[in-house]
Image (cartoon, rainbow, N blue to C red):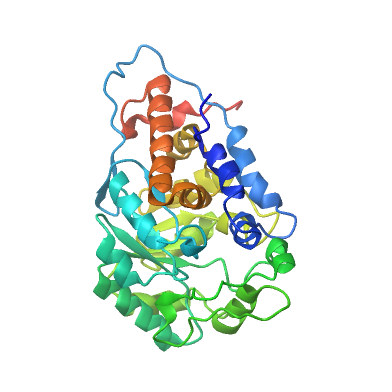
Amino acid sequence: MTSEPINLHDFETAARSRLTSMALGYYRSGAHDEITLRRNQEAYQQIALRYRVLVDVSARDLSTTVLGQRVRAPMLIAPTAFHCLATADGELATVRAAGSAGTVMVVSTLSNTAIEDICQAAEGPVWFQLYVYKDRAATRGLIERAEAAGASALVLTVDAPLLGRRERDVRNEFRLPPGLSVKNLMPAGLDEVSHQLQESGLAAYFASLLDPSLSWHDIAWLRSITRLPLVIKGIVRADDARRAHDAGAAGVVVSNHGGRQLDTSVATIDVLPEIVAAVGDELEVFIDGGIRRGTDVLKALALGARAVLLGRPILWGLSVAGQAGAERVLGILAEELELAMALCGAPQIDTITRDLIWSRT
């Protein structure tokens, strides 16, 4: 019997024995009672597929485009912080895995590796995830660095005016180990996460630096200082998706921050259809949260998503086997998606349509 992980759940199980308790708690944690964390996955399980038969599926094609960039499969790597907690190569391992898989890596502002080094190691598109800081000069500097390094899009996270309370981190008194910092903020002197002895050092870091006054009015300023297309991440309402369109965004990510911000918030797949209905012909709509199977990807695409973003599963892959682990996570999900497409009678991405989703109404 093989002991190698054969699905994404196996990778999570294997990662638990390889990570420190503090790193595992940080990666796994959701807000408060972690209801939304669980709901994100459970919502996919409640969606049934109604497959087609007698369709020629002898050739399958998973490729698509995101913001005009070709990817081998509709799975991107979501922005997650502190990859050096998972593997010594950190984000360098992640971006190399993205290149091997022919997809996009979205680099977190809170990466342990500088955006310049990540882009230099990249073989494919890199997008840069942005938080807006009280220090707007630091924010502008981040954007300028991302542009100069070669990032091809900005992903603005808007669901974190304050950091959600993640009780695992509070109990573990989360802080970065000595030697690790937030490299993208080093020139601005904002790279050291607090090492205070109570609560979570990350929560204190966010509270001191992030701008809770950020509003839709600030999107115009942001767009005025960059030539990069802007994707707004953290949308769970159709009216906010429309505001993103009106503000000039190129896309939105339907996201509740992996269940790490407001607990009991809606599962992302449950609100995807209304957001697609509101802006789907005018913006590219992406989704993250709870995706663990190829059928989950197919369901998201059938409900109108352009592509999905993977967060925690990539971290589990990195924890288990570094770059090779992250590559295998992406490979397994692509294999599962291809099988699901064949069994649904949908050999190309554009044949994954809404009629594959069964509804009682």
Question: Which image quarter: residue 335?
Answer: top left
Q: Reply above or below: 351 against 155.
A: above
Residue at position x 64%, y 62% from top?
A: 22
Q: Would residue 307 be seen by someone viewing this image from the given angle?
A: no
Q: Reply above or below: 64 against 341.
A: below
Q: Would residue 346 be seen by someone viewing this image from the given angle?
A: yes
Question: Which image quarter: residue 207?
Answer: bottom right
Residue at position x 50%, y 50% from top?
A: 288
Measured from the top left, where is residue 246 in percent x and y?
40, 65
Q: Is residue 260 left or right of residue 352?
A: right
Q: Is residue 329 left or right of residue 347?
A: right
Measured from the top left, where is residue 84 in percent x and y?
47, 63
Residues 325 and 43: in front is: 325
Which quadrant holds the C terminus?
top right
Measured from the top left, where is residue 300 in percent x and y?
47, 40
Q: Reply above or below: 351 against 174.
A: above
Question: Which image quarter: residue 53?
Answer: top left
Q: Is residue 95 left or right of residue 44?
A: left
Measured from the top left, where is residue 170 in percent x and y?
72, 68
Q: Is residue 193 left or right of residue 118?
A: right
